[in-house]
Amino acid sequence: MNKTACALALISCAWGHAAIADEFQDVRCGADIPKALIGRHSSNGRVAVLEKKYGSLGLKDLGSDEISDRLSSVSWRICGAEFVLLIDRGGLVRDVLPFPQHSRQAPAFSGNCQLKGRELPDVVLAILDGASAEDLLPVQSAWKIDQQHVKFVKASSEGLLCPRSGIYTVDGGP
């Protein structure tokens, strides 16, 4: 009977620990941040509480987008760098993209882009070339969201143009 009680106590502690765990629990600056996040459950708590709890990581919520009724992208500043998390409807972090630095001259973008005058069906995350005064800006680097496999996929930037309306950069855009 003693062994059964000990086993139940251990299981109870493990479940209790899992219940309070969140996606940032195993993240450490200088370590593989995407690896620490993928497969974790996103917390449903208040952002201010998470940012305070993980102050040592410099955690800052940078916003989110609903990609579909079953998928969202959430951007976080972690350890001084930006990361975009793909989170499924169940709250599971499915993929993480270390997102390059962006600026007024090279703004961040999320949305649909065009290739050879045709709008592409995939949601694209990109860094644009903000030097142009045109409404459609050329792309410096891009990733499409593969909704079927819930992954970020590097996309060719050749000939890809994206509208200014999808710029979301925190530094004001062009």
Image (spheres, grey):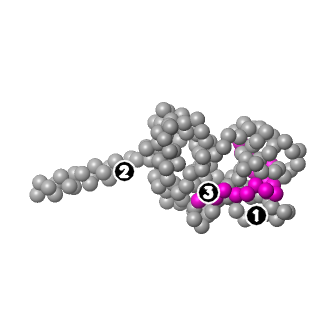
| Residue beneath disc 1 | 120
What's the residue type where badge 3 is placed?
Answer: Phe
Residue at the spot 70% in from the left edge and 58% down from the top edge? 155
The kind of secondary structure element at disc 2 is: helix
Region rendered in magenta: 151-169
Left-right relation of 33 to 12: right
- In three-dimensional space, the C-alpha distance between marks 1 and 2, rounded to whole angstroms, equals 40 Å
Q: Nearer the viewer, residue 132 or 6?
A: 132
Residue contact between numbered discs 1 and 2, judged by CB atoms under 8 Å: no
Q: Nearer the viewer, residue 110 or 19?
A: 110
- Residue lying farthest to the bottom in this orientation: 148
**Which mark is first along the chain, 2 or 3?**
2
Tell me the quarter of the picture where residue 158 sits: bottom right
| Residue beneath disc 3 | 152
Residue at the spot 44% in from the left edge and 47% down from the top edge? 22
Tell me if mark 3 has few (under 14), some (14-19) or many (20+) residues whose alpha carbon lies within 10 angstroms of its own: many
Residue 18, numbered circle: 2
Q: Is residue 52 visible?
A: no
Tell me if mark 2 has few (under 14), some (14-19) or many (20+) residues whose alpha carbon lies within 10 angstroms of its own: few
Q: Is residue 153 magenta?
A: yes
